[in-house]
Amino acid sequence: MYTIFQRTEIAEPALFGPSDTTKRVKNFPEICVSTFSEPIIRKFSSLDEAEQIAGLCSANGVLPVYKINYRDQPIAFYRSMVGAPACAACFEEIIAMGAKKFVLFGSCGVLDDDTVKDSIIIPVSAVRDEGTSYHYIASSPEIEADARSVRILEDVLKNCGYSYVKGKTWTSDAIYRETISAVRERRQEGCLAVEMECASMLAVSKYRGIPFIQFLYGADNLSSDTWDMRDLNVYGLTHAETYMVLAFECGLAL
């Protein structure tokens, strides 16, 4: 029996797609930004100029989708769900609503603290240690980020004066199974970070032909055999404005 992990081609067509479950939204902004942090989304959605324009519906409830104007450009934003399957499904439905460019940011576990320090991480590729990406792109150990998207993100960070490092990330499905041996192995392979969505989001964006940028900021530290939670439970709120403005700038540059 062959599973999706052994197949060399992606089967087509799908029985149903996101446009079958999600209605197109009139005048939906071309640019959409998302993060996983509820506090960051709450902070920006409470601004007077922000308005709700749609909702992502699931058995978990409704995720509001907002619109805000940034430098005279309408930009949609919403909170992504954690984990590759849910994050990718929301991405699919946002595309069905009308988004044409997408920027995602979120926290990660740092695997190489000496290299990352306090810098923003630009993922140039992702180890596919999850399942969702294999339903969009044929089996391979890694998936590369789009070179143009990497250049745009790099230029935005330079222009805004923020330090960054480029490197590989490890996308895992199981947050509580990041074993010491696996962490060591991924670090030896050159991974700077571990997270749960990048590989799948790169795969969906390639499959759908949507320009996509993702950047990461370090939270907990996995650089040694002792886990350091650091500011994982702050959910990025300390630098909320920095991250959102960087994402907005990336969206305009895509």
Image: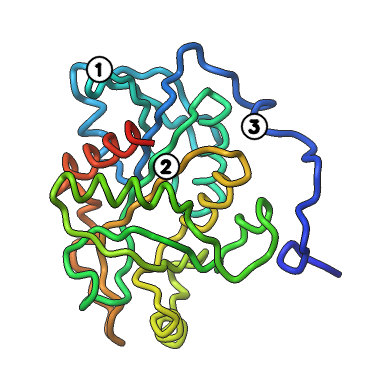
Instruction: Check disc 3 and report the residue beneath it.
Output: 18
Taking the spot 32% from the left edge, 56% from the top edge, the residue there is 216
Q: Is residue 232 left or right of residue 213?
A: left
- Residue 28 — which label? none
| Depth check, front residue: 196 or 28 | 28
Comes first in the chain, label 2 or label 3: 3
- Give the camera-side residue of 63 and 158: 158
At label 3, counting other C-alpha atoms closer than 10 Å, the crowd grade (few under 14, some 14-19, many 20 or more) is some
Q: Position of residue 182 (x, y in %)?
A: 46, 82
Disc number for residue 80: 2
Mark 1 vs mark 2, CA separation in Å = 25 Å
Specify whether 220 is left or right of 83. left
Q: Quadrant of the C terminus?
A: top left
Q: Is residue 12 left or right of residue 134?
A: right
Q: Is residue 186 above or below residue 146?
A: below
Residue 72 is labelled as 1
Give the mark count: 3
| Residue occupying the point 38% across, 52% down | 150
Question: Residue at 57% of width from left, 18% of height from top?
Answer: 24
Q: Quadrant of residue 50?
A: top left
* Of pointers 1 and 2, the one earlier in the residue sequence: 1
Provide residue 196's location: percent of width, then percent of height: 45, 60
C-beta proximity under 8 Å, tags 1 and 3: no
